[in-house]
Amino acid sequence: MPLSKLVASLPIHPSKAASVRRLMRILTISGIFSHRNDDELQEEERYVLTNVSRILLKDHPFCMAPFFDVFFDPKLLKPWYQLSNWFKKCNTNNSPFETEHGMPFWEFSSHDKKLGSSFHDAMTNDSRLVSSVVVEKFKGVFEGVESLVDVGGGNGTMAKTIAKSFPQMECIVFDLPDVVSGFQGNSENIKYVGGDMFEAIPAADAVLLKCILHDWNDEECVKLLKKCKEAITKKGKKGKVIIIDMVVGNENGDKGSLETQLLFDMLMMVLVTGKERNVKEWAKLFFSSGFNNYKIIPIMMSSRSLIEVYP
Ligand SMILES: C[S@@+](CC[C@H](N)C(=O)[O-])C[C@H]1O[C@@H](n2cnc3c(N)ncnc32)[C@H](O)[C@@H]1O
């Protein structure tokens, strides 16, 4: 698209065209757009989408724009300015987010409906992408599972995709009461249940934890994993816990992927009490919570792995 068309298509005043050109120049150097000047006689610069900007298009099936919207919300950016203060304090269980806003992220986002809804929109898009990969390429993980509870399952995007692929499976979306109160299950195999995962988790053959454990510190994770173990053994069976999260330094990881993982680790440090973990750190959590075995399957290059954990 030529610069003039770009300016005309956006709610931008024509007097700002030169500034848009400057903005596009840095975005092009950064790989968000690329440049095209295949017609030497045509003087006007033209910009082309790259893989990075294509995934931000609203009509892209896995549009990631809501992710950027929420993580660049001033309420989520301000805690980064608290890092300096936070490093000087001895209390490690209090995130820079809590230092800034006076309450933990989950409490804040359940009061601030606008932020909460942007956050869940972002997670929905991520779950849409991850669930499509999982049911397409790693279906075997769910074979033989008759019931599944998606703990911290938000609006149920992940569970709905699994339930559609496995119509015989009973699926429960379990999340904080405020989060699930507006959702209705279907009469077939999806049900929403509200509660606190640190108190009790509904019984099922498998517990799914997608993007949950990285939100919490080691003590909190051990507490939660023990509750998961209770839930999968309540029915007299030996079920399994299915974790979808990052495994830092995954073998195929190139420098860019490792950088992404470590930036997510910083995000966990600033917003919540969690962290991204390497294999050793994951194993320590599992054995400390009373599990006996685990298997790691990288599902989306190094950005996400699926970990099966057995009692
Ligand atoms: C990072 S989101 C992940 C959502 C979803 N699993 C996904 O990946 O799209 C974490 C979820 O944990 C839920 N959560 C936080 N504290 C919880 C608690 N004590 N009990 C149950 N759910 C909780 C949040 O409401 C949120 O939906």
Image (spheres, rainbow, N blue to C red):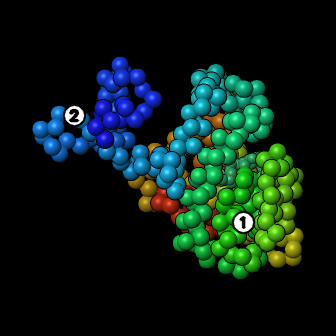
Measure the C-alpha gap from mark 1 to mark 2. Answer: 56 Å
Checking the image for residue 44, the label placed there is 2
x%, y% of residue 123? Answer: 63, 49
Query: Furthest-left residue in view?
Result: 41
| Residue shown at the point (82%, 77%) measured from the top left | 237
Q: What SS does tag 2 mark?
A: loop
Q: Earlier along the polypeptide chain: callout 1 or callout 2?
A: 2
Checking the image for residue 33, the label placed there is none
- In the displayed structure, would residue 228 be above or below residue 56? below
Q: Residues within 10 Å of mark 1 (few under 14, many from 20)?
A: many
x%, y% of residue 169? Answer: 75, 75
Q: Nearer the viewer, residue 12 or 256?
A: 12
Residue 87 seen from this side: no
x%, y% of residue 125? Answer: 59, 52
Q: Where, by quadrant of the figure, is residue 131 drawn?
A: bottom right
The amino acid on which the numbered mark 1 sits, given as a three-letter code, is: Val
251 on left or right of 206:
left
Q: Nearer the viewer, residue 162 or 220?
A: 162
Residue 114 seen from this side: yes
Q: Where, by quadrant of the figure, is residue 201 drawn?
A: bottom right
Residue topped by disc 1: 241
Query: Furthest-bottom residue in view?
Result: 144
The amino acid on which the numbered mark 2 sits, given as a three-letter code, is: Glu
